[in-house]
Image (tube, rainbow, N blue to C red):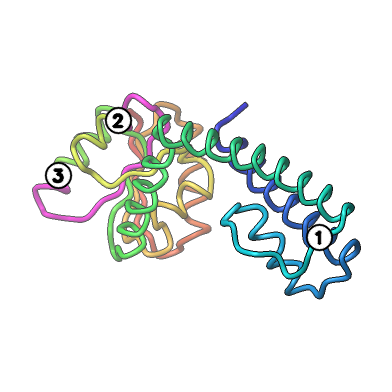
């Protein structure tokens, strides 16, 4: 199971336990919503605060059940979050958000679709003229190299609107598509033209 899915499941489990706790205290003890929420939180967190009143046998059994399910849910959550951190996905997500914020601030930049021979040559020329650019590439290996060089990039398929929008096509002045396939380059040209009619588009097969 994917690590991110485990995180979603852990949040769902905690929400279910919280809901059960509030509903249970409202029904069994006749507490108001706020008091039931208070009882549920101190039970789930095991902070040791005093109860609002002396618990009867039914309330004690329900509290034991709530504590047990809370411990299981918290254990699963801690395990999922630890796995998420160790796998590097958390830091990867933070890095992607940081890069995306930088891209969103660009205006009048150039988008390079594909980082083959022609894509690299285009990048070098843009560097020489000190122009901002964003690279769209779907190869993990190539993206890792681009990351090491510190260039702004979007990992994805340049033929999709999603990748073009992430690269800032709506505010870009130029787009260079240098994909290996002529058909893909044509598709990028048509998609980019729809998203930004003022963008200057150059197609160069790699």
Residue assigned mark 2? 144
Q: Nearer the viewer, residue 16 or 165?
A: 16
* Residue 14 in the figure: left or right of residue 100: right
Q: CA distance from mark 1 to mark 2?
A: 59 Å
* Residue 65 in the figure: left or right of residue 87: right
* Residue 81 in the figure: left or right of residue 7: left
- Judged from this view, the residue extending furthest toward the left is 128
Q: Position of residue 30 (x, y in %)?
A: 88, 70
Q: Which of labels 1 and 2 is toward the front?
A: 1
Q: Nearer the viewer, residue 7 or 194?
A: 7
Q: CA distance from mark 3 to mark 1?
A: 76 Å
Residue that appears at 53% across and 49% down:
161
Residue 154 falls in image quadrant = top left
Indicate the quadrant containing the C terminus: top left, top right, bottom left or bottom right. Answer: top left
Residue assigned mark 1? 55
Residue assigned mark 3? 125
Q: Nearer the viewer, residue 24 or 89?
A: 24
Tag 3 secondary structure? helix
The first of marks 1 and 2 along the sequence is 1
Q: Position of residue 9 (x, y in %)?
A: 67, 40
Q: Is residue 116 above or below residue 58?
A: above
The first of marks 3 and 2 along the sequence is 3
Residue 132 sits inside the magenta stretch: yes
Residue that appears at 46% across and 63% down:
197
Q: CA distance from mark 3 to mark 2?
A: 21 Å
């Amino acid at each position: 199971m994917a690590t991110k899915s485990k995180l979603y499941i852990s949040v769902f489990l905690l929400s279910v336990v919280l809901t059960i706790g509030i509903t249970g205290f409202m029904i069994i003890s006749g507490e108001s919503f706020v008091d039931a929420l208070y009882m549920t939180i101190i039970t789930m967190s095991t902070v040791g605060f005093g109860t609002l009143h002396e618990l009867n046998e039914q309330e004690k059994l329900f509290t034991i059940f709530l504590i047990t399910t809370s411990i299981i849910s918290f254990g699963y959550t801690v395990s999922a979050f630890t796995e998420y951190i160790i796998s590097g996905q958390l830091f990867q997500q933070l890095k992607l958000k940081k890069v995306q914020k930088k891209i969103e601030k660009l205006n009048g930049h150039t988008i390079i679709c594909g980082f083959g021979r022609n894509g690299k040559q285009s990048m070098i020329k843009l560097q020489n003229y000190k122009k901002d650019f964003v690279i769209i590439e779907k190869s993990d290996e190539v993206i890792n190299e681009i990351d090491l060089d510190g260039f702004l990039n979007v990992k994805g398929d340049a033929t999709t609107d999603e990748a073009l929008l992430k690269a800032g096509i709506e505010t870009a002045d130029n787009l260079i598509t240098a994909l290996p396939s002529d058909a893909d380059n044509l598709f990028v040209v048509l998609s980019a033209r729809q998203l930004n009619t003022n963008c200057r588009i150059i197609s160069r097969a790699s």
